[in-house]
Image (cartoon, rainbow, N blue to C red):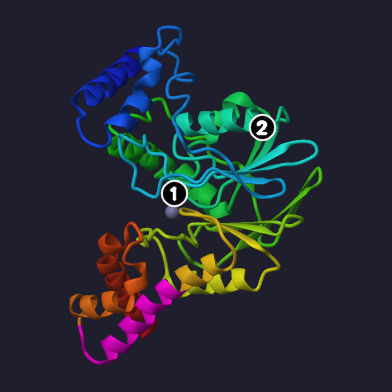
Amino acid sequence: MKNHLVLSMAIAFSLTACGGDKSAELQEKAAAPVAQAAIDTSDPKVYHQDILGKYVPQKVADRVYVIHGPTEMPTPENAGFMNNPGFIIGSESVVVIDPGSSGQAGRSVVQRIKELTDKPITHVFVTHIHGDHWLGNQGIKEAFPEAKFYAHPKMIEMANEGEAESWVKLMMTLTDNKTAGTEAVIPDQVLAHVEELNIGDITIRAHFTEHAHTVTDVMFEVVEDKVLFTGDNITYKRIPRMTDGNFKGNIAAANYGLEMPIDVVVPGHGPTGGKEVLTAYRDYLATVYESAEVMMEEGLEAFEMKDAIVEKLAEYKEWPGMMDEVGKHISLAVTELEEASF
Ligand SMILES: [Zn+2]
């Protein structure tokens, strides 16, 4: 274990030494704890403690905070951190939603929370199976062994059947081992649709959707605060992968959110806002899906649709991920439409 960490630190060092581009500053930041002799860098609980860097909690409602992560894919520079960990500080305790992509990210989230309150973290809610949202559970579990971890039953099942290990490995690969030492803490508390949990003076209501971003999605309503955490059923100013998704179900999930008595929408990635966050992503998905449907009827193949559909999506062109993903999204929409027509 120790040798493994030394190795990964050596990699971190060599990356820093080589980095002459604009990411050099971030790499320096990521490697900073290594350079400080006072910190025991062989201890994974300390290493990368400040992985979140400039990403600090922002208040989105009275008691609700979000650390809006980078809207990039996982890289060595961001050490895999790329989602929106959220937390609610109640009268008794703290509730966390999606604590990030690695043990390191989770520890950094704990550190940020401790800067604001000395109340314990007692409950963690996971929005879906993708590891960039929940591998941070490890950091919470280390600091608060009594904390309970909740998710969709299918998330728990899939994670235990191999998805957890795949995500640990994937994050290692994408970050050049910056997530070394990360172990999957798989939720064991099974949620049900519209289940309500009363945690001191915080009420969390879990909303299941049909197959949307994945088959494991839960959106979390913070009832008193009128806040909705959507997971990746909704992303804003960033276009996600839809490889595990379903266009029709995801559009329905956005419409479901629009009916809810909420004022604040925290997307899985990208900035928090009001209900326009739901509408914007729904309209992206609907444009892809409905355009593909019309063009299929005209006899076009998926690859022939791209230019016309991209033109219709002009307002999303600057969203990170859009130009990488739109071609794949069209293919997925076509496959979905073909399946629906049987
Ligand atoms: Zn996702």
Q: Give the range drawn in magenta.
A: 283-300
Which residue is at the front of the view, 304 or 189? Answer: 304
Observer able to see residue 1: no
For the stretch drawn in magenta, what is the main secondary structure? helix
Vertical arrangement, residue 107 with respect to residue 75, above or below: above
Q: Position of residue 144 (x, y in %)?
A: 65, 27
Q: Give me the residue at 57% from left, 40% from top.
A: 57
Q: How far apart are marks 2 and 1 (CA)?
A: 28 Å
Query: Quarter of the image containing the C terminus?
Result: bottom left
Query: Quarter of the image containing the N terminus?
Result: top left
Q: Position of residue 116 (x, y in %)?
A: 66, 32
Q: Is residue 171 left or right of residue 64?
A: left
The amino acid pointed to by label 1 is His
Vertical arrangement, residue 238 with respect to residue 337, above or below: above
Q: Does the residue labelled 1 lie within 8 Å of ligand 1?
A: yes
Which mark is drawn over residue 130? 1
Count the numbered circles shown.
Answer: 2
- Find disc 2 in the rendering and name its residue: 116
Q: Give me the residue at 25% from left, 68% from top.
A: 327
Which is in the foreground here, disc 2 or disc 1?
2
Q: Where is residue 289 in the image (x, y as percent from the top left)?
A: 37, 78
Which residue is at the front of the view, 212 or 19? Answer: 19
Judged from the image, the secondary structure of the residue bearing numbered disc 1 is loop
Q: Is residue 301 left or right of residue 25?
A: left
Vertical arrangement, residue 334 with respect to residue 223, above or below: below
Judged from the image, the secondary structure of the residue bearing numbered disc 2 is loop
Residue 247 is one of the magenta-drawn residues: no
Q: Give me the residue at 27% from left, 86% from top.
A: 296
Residue 298 is one of the magenta-drawn residues: yes
The amino acid pointed to by label 2 is Leu
Q: Is residue 92 left or right of residue 160?
A: right
